[in-house]
């Protein structure tokens, strides 16, 4: 606004002391106004009016300036809130903000009912994010991939039509992006609870990329049109449901399917397993192995097989081109005897000429070790010789196997191609406290040792009762033998589950663990970058505390 106005001319009667003195004299004498002064009365009156008008104009101008000042202050406050030092999140580029949203979705789940009160509807949390500001609103609504993570739970307090409407909205906003979803009905709800939402979901089956069904009834012919499906997971407890699911999968056209998870005693004999990258079979009764193994023989990728020991069947001899095998057992202390006798026929009857990685585990807490009797060890060595493990097996994880110190040398001697090894001490209650005997450590630490010469990674769950000088020399030797740009990696873990809270704390502060960690740190520096050490506490096979370093 331009403030243009003619300059104000002050009155000529201002600041004239002689003029004012003459007026005062005439007033005291009660004399008439002289002619030369009478002519000035009109001019003074005009000047008073002119001053009044100027004061009114200036008051209006002051008021306008006050309003303009208030507007500028509001603008300054808004601008200040955008300064990066005040609100750093406002300078995040949209790509990074979207990445944060994606991580939040993966961590929390798009369907808020899994984590929030069940009276909420799907994608409520996405709407909450969208209401933070207009930028977030546009970013969320205009990004299809933010609406592709779907979690459908039977325990919705909202009516199915409300859930179906929210799902339809999400499918519309996801446009043509691939969909990843989970359907959970673990408590055995009838189909009408999820029927309408599943029918909405089925309309976009051509966009399914990852589908997980837990305990739910099969919603019609859902696999008629799934050209993009890459991952399929089915967990059904009822035999009638398992049969229906398998029949549907057998006839389905899933050209991109790479990952298959089946939980329960499914009949997989008619499934196309040859082209799968990874197959996971969980909760399989060991008594059904005789019918399962012929199907396993057709698998060429990775296989994760979890058995429930309920008997020891007569097994057929098979040869399978599996690349990696993870063999687990759902067991407890009452079935350990069955385990010891179960692994032996498996190793006696299975030949794995292309196996590059093998893991043996048990899914129970507290820690239970798989018994490794002499007969089992002999059967494994025969399997290794028959399968050519000496040339092919590169990774072996037997941290949950009750291996004896006297058994480990023969096992390592049969696996010269081994590059990664996971092993554990038997436990504090075992008479053989360390799985690494002195002779074995001396052999492993010798220059150009013939035992696992390619080994570059060791994961060791220990009681720290090994021969320390021999163990350190073993690490030095392996670090020196590594190629120029390579490192020997040690992941050292120690048991804490047998210790009380106070004992664990003292072990952290002044115990042998801390002393060993400092020694390994010094050895790591001494190696000149050829040795990498990580120390962590270990309480369960898949649960460990933060890395200490």
Image (tube, helix red, strand yellow):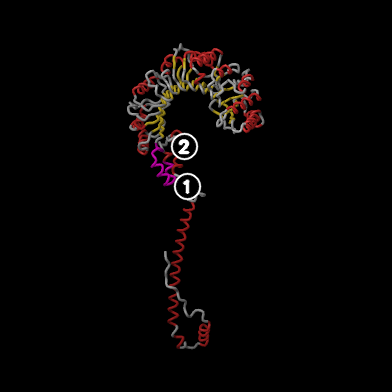
Q: Specify whether residue 450 is in view.
A: yes
From the viewer's perspective, is residue 185 above or below residue 4? above
Which residue is the site of mark 2? 103
Q: In the image, residue 492 lies at what x, y percent?
A: 59, 27
- Residue numbers of the magenta segment: 127-147
Q: Is residue 526 above or below residue 453?
A: below
> Is residue 461 in the magenta section?
no
Q: Quadrant of the C terminus?
A: top right
Q: Nearer the viewer, residue 1 or 28?
A: 1
Q: Secondary structure at mark 1?
A: helix
Image location of residue 379, percent across then percent down: 52, 13
Q: Is residue 163 left or right of residue 324?
A: left
Q: Earlier in the sequence, mark 1 or mark 2?
A: 1
Q: Residue at x 58, y 25 (%)?
A: 460
The nearer-to-camera label among 1 and 2 is: 1
Q: Secondary structure at mark 2?
A: helix
Q: Which numbered disc covers residue 506? A: none
| Figure quadrant of residue 447 | top right
Magenta span: predominant SS is helix
Cα distance, mark 1 to mark 2?
A: 19 Å
Residue highlighted by disc 1: 91
146 in magenta: yes
Q: In front here: 220 or 493?
A: 493
Taking 446 as reference, is 331 left or right?
left
- Quadrant hosting residue 531: top right
Query: In this image, 130 relative to 485: left or right?
Result: left
Does 108 sit above or below residue 398?
A: below
Question: Which residue is nearer to you in this view: 270 or 497?
Answer: 270
User: How far across and how far down the image is residue 50, in percent?
Assistant: 43, 75
Q: How many marks?
A: 2
């Amino acid at each position: 606004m331009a403030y243009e106005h003619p300059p104000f001319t002050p009155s000529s009667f201002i600041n004239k002391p002689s003029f004012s003195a003459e007026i005062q004299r005439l007033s005291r004498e009660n004399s008439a106004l002289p002619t030369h002064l009478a002519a000035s009365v009109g001019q003074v009156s005009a000047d008073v009016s002119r001053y009044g008008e100027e004061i009114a104009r200036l008051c209006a101008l002051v008021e306008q300036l006050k309003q303009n000042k208030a507007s500028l202050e509001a603008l300054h406050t808004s601008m200040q809130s955008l300064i990066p030092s005040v609100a750093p999140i406002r300078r995040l580029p949209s790509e990074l903000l979207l990445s944060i949203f994606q991580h939040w979705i993966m961590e929390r789940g798009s369907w808020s009912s899994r984590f929030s009160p069940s009276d909420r509807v799907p994608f409520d949390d996405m709407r909450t994010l969208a209401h933070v500001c207009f930028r977030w609103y546009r970013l969320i609504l205009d990004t299809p991939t933010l609406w592709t993570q779907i979690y459908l739970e039977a325990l919705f307090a909202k009516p199915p039509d409300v859930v179906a409407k929210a799902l339809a909205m999400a499918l519309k906003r996801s446009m043509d992006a691939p969909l990843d979803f989970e359907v959970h009905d673990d408590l055995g709800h009838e189909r009408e609870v999820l029927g309408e939402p599943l029918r909405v979901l089925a309309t976009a089956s051509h966009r399914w990329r990852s589908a997980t069904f837990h305990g739910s009834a099969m919603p019609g012919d859902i696999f008629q049109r799934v050209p993009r499906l890459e991952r399929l997971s089915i967990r059904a407890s009822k035999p009638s449901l398992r049969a229906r699911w398998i029949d549907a999968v057998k006839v389905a056209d899933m050209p991109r399917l790479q990952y298959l998870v089946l939980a329960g005693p499914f009949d997989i004999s008619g499934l196309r397993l040859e082209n799968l990258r990874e197959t996971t079979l969980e909760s399989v009764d060991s008594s059904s192995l005789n019918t399962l193994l012929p199907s396993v023989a057709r698998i060429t990728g990775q296989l994760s097989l979890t058995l429930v020991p309920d008997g020891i069947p007569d097994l057929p001899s098979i040869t399978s081109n599996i690349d990696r095998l993870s063999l687990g057992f759902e067991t407890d202390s009452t079935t350990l005897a069955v385990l010891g006798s179960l692994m032996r026929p498996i190793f006696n009857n299975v030949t794995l000429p292309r196996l590059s990685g093998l893991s043996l585990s048990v899914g129970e807490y507290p820690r239970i070790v798989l018994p490794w009797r002499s007969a089992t060890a002999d059967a494994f060595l025969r399997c290794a010789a028959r399968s050519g493990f000496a040339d092919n097996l590169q990774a072996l994880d037997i941290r949950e196997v009750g291996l004896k110190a006297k058994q480990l040398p023969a096992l390592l001697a049969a696996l010269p191609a081994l590059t990664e090894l996971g092993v554990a001490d038997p436990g504090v209650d075992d008479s053989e406290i360390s799985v690494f005997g002195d002779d074995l450590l001396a052999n492993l630490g010798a220059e150009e040792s013939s035992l696992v010469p390619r080994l570059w990674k060791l994961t060791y769950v220990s009681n720290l009762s090994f021969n320390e000088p021999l163990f350190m020399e073993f690490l030095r030797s392996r670090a020196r033998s590594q190629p120029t740009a390579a490192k020997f990696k040690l992941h050292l873990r120690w048991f804490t589950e047998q210790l009380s809270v106070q004992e664990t704390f003292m072990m952290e502060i002044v115990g042998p663990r801390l002393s060993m960690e400092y020694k390994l740190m010094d050895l790591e520096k001494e190696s000149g970058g050829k040795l990498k050490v990580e120390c962590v506490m270990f309480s369960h096979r898949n649960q460990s505390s933060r890395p200490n370093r």
